[in-house]
Amino acid sequence: MRRDHGETMSDRFLFHDVLQPFVAQSGHSLGQLSRAAGIPKATIANWLQGHVRKPRKVTDLLKLAAALHLDEAEASHLLVAAGYPPLERLRGENNGADAELFAPWPPSGSEARAPFQAIADLATFTGRESELEALAQALLQPHHETIYILHGMGGVGKTTLAAHLAYRLRAHFSDGVLWASPRRTDPMAILLALASALGHDVGAFTDVGTRSAVVRDILADRRVLIVLDDAGSSEEVRPLLPPSGPAAVLITTRQRNLGATWGVRAFQIGPFAADGTEALELFARILGRERVQQERKQFVEMGHLLGNLPLAIAVAACRLAHESNWATADFLERLHCEQQRLDQLASGQESVRLSFNLSFEALSPEQQRLFSALGALGGEDFGVEAAAHCAALPLAVTADLLRELFNLSLVQQGRPGRYRLHPLLRDFARERARPPVIDEALFERAVGYFLDFVDANEIDFVALDREIGNITEVLAIAHERQMLPEVVRGVNALFPYLATRGLSTMAPLQLSRAIAAARGLGDARSLMTALHRQGQIERLRGNFEQATIHLNEGLALAGELNESSSLSALMSELVLVEQMRTDDRRADRYYRGRRGAAQAGDEPPQASTVLLGLGLFKLARGNCREADGYLQSGLRLARAAGDPVESSSLLLALGMAAYRAGNYHRAVGYLSEALSMARETGYGAVHAAAVMGLGIVTGRRGAYAEAQPYVEEGLALSRAVGRSWAVGGMLSEWGNVCLDLGETGAAAAAFEEALQIARATRARGLIGEVLYGLARLAIRRDDLAEAVRLARESVVLLRETAHYKAGEVEEWLDTLDTPDFILPLER
């Protein structure tokens, strides 16, 4: 490749490439070198920055080599790189003039020190122990019939690893460690430099084939390590390879298939471990362990945002360490902004964006088009069809291009048949997704593709699981770009999946966007639907006040639109909220009306849902037999309609009713069937509650140790799906089981957490239940006064909410107030 002014790449880069590591190894500043060598500081800076192809005065080079304390081989290497003869020939041509310039390298019959050209080893080098061990084992073999390749995306630290390895193994390579950069220097110049470092001048051989053969002969019996850093192609590397023998070759490259036909041994180098431990260690080495330990959570989050990419972490840490007035929280906030993230990852000559750009600019226009289009995909991974649609390319062409990008380390393998993009590469791809690289319709195509996918797979939750990251990403894109109809359409289509999977944070966010979009469109019917669904989600999360606000607004819209079925559904949801929060008579009156309508055949198609509500209401009132009747009727309707989601909810409720009635065998049967069905449908909320219910029933049967794993799994699943109110009720019941089994410590922990949840959700009936449990616990601890106080507070709340346990607590409290009270009566 030639530049407009006629310089070759080797002219441009060889001299400063060789000089830079010598300066770095010396540890001297430019000012110190300027004073030691008697050369202007600006001159040295120009050399280091690559502005000078060949210094005008060889004497200046000799002065700098002396100031750097280079040995004869290193000085010769520098001279040859600058276009001058090696030191021995230069000394002969000098004929004694300026002898003092050659004084640091007096002629000697003694054996010269082996050259060592590796770049500086970083004091902050972190991790990679398994890679170092495997590489050392390979490179220290006495004979090498293969070469060794480190491949990976830009910024993973391939060069840093190679340098660290060179220092670690230096003593094992008696003839030296040689270093070259084939991407930036042509083979002829590298061959000249390699030979010169070993004391040979091959300048007389002017074609690459002959010079390569001569250098191979020089290397044939040499115990050297040759590092070819950042190789871009096999053609760059092939002339530089020694013959099989003691010489070892280590190549760093971004290409997975470099030298695939040579029988190479390849080592893939990826980002730091996903658990964040290596990233934290690098932060600690740069910023100090005390600071990182104090702000550990923030640094873990930072590492995650940066995809644990070593270069990005090092740059972020250096900015925090060396730039003034950077608080970790402030820098982290900037990294959260996708549009600014790559801007923050540059410090001095280190830049994540520039590292990625080296790979991008080497791509063909078609490869660039596809890579840029991948920025619209935000999931864990993506399929070929989605990539083809976004890039507006044929499927077969896209498949081939993705394989090429994979070989260039710009995409990685995802799940079988899919690819993934590192998060920072996604940021970079989005930056490049601008004309003329790609047209502005990219994001519209991405949104359209995945909304069509949701429509086509509305009840195929396994398919939606696979693409949910991409779906939520395009919904965010639609929201940001004010694509209001697409937001409403996408969220409405996705809601059954969100509700069934119990995605507690995702559902409210998406519904809030749908509400805003519907308001912007003036679409009253879509707004009503979104408000209804948001109210339902908030109820399930235990946010009863928010649920009431959304449902009342939806109810008003349903009245304006004269939507009788929606009015009925919204009223049902409101009454459920009231039931959970207060259990008042309003719910009773409402359900009496619904029961009459159901018996008269006037209920809308969602009659099974109404019967589920009736059953749960009666269960909350302690009427297990009536609850069972309603729930059995609802189950028959749900099964006849082929609705597995509704059926699993009714089976769960039937299990609860059987448990309350003391029929544990029947309860296990219902709960097990509900669990099996929930696993098949992916209904996370029922799955969680059924597991927890099995644990509670098992505990009631006296098998505490057997029940514990069920309870722990059920609680974890319930928290994951965001059913906080349900978690509170489960914990309260589990606390009672533990108390009756004599496990007072476990009971106390369950009651305390249940009370926190009940108070946070303002569920007064649940608060009353938990206080009763705590009162019973106080008796076990011989604290009669505390027991009386808690029980009296419990009675007040249970009376207010018409809770079926109010009478039980009153009777129990009466026993505490009798003079002849004794502890065994409490049981």
Image (cartoon, rainbow, N blue to C red):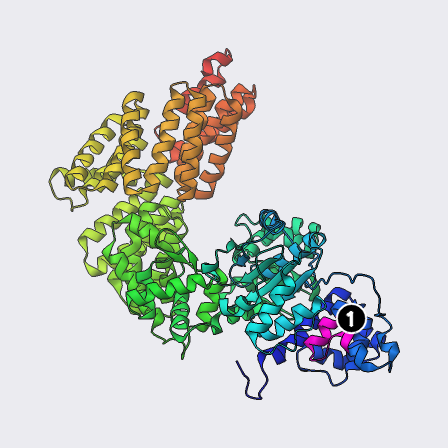
Above or below, 603 relative to 222: above
Residue type at mark 1: give it: Ser
Secondary structure of the residue carrying numbered label 1 = loop
Above or below, 110 relative to 77: above
Taking the magenta stretch, the answer to whether it contains residue 716 is no
**Viewed as shown, does residue 489 lie left or right of 158?**
left
Comparing 209 with 62, the one in front is 209
Comparing 741 with 199, the one in front is 199
Comparing 719 with 339, the one in front is 339
Camera sees residue 389:
no
Instruction: Give the x, y percent position of residue 507.
Output: 36, 52
Q: Main secondary structure of the magenta part?
A: helix
Camera sees residue 401:
yes
Q: Which residue is mark 1?
A: 29
The mark tally for this picture is 1
Taking the magenta stretch, the answer to whether it contains residue 80 is yes
**Viewed as shown, does residue 701 lie left or right of 227?**
left
User: For the point 58% across and 82% down, which residue is it?
Assistant: 8
Q: Which residues are magenta?
A: 75-89
**Viewed as shown, does residue 367 lie left or right of 264?**
left
Instruction: Give the x, y percent position of residue 541.
Output: 39, 45
- The quarter of the picture where residue 681 lies is top left
**Viewed as shown, does residue 321 lie left or right of 663?**
right
User: For the point 42% across and 76% down, which residue is it?
Assistant: 434
Tell me if mark 1 has few (under 14), some (14-19) or many (20+) residues whose alpha carbon lies within 10 angstroms of its own. Answer: few
Instruction: Give the x, y percent position of residue 293.
Output: 66, 48
User: For the point 52% across and 28% down, which residue is it?
Assistant: 748
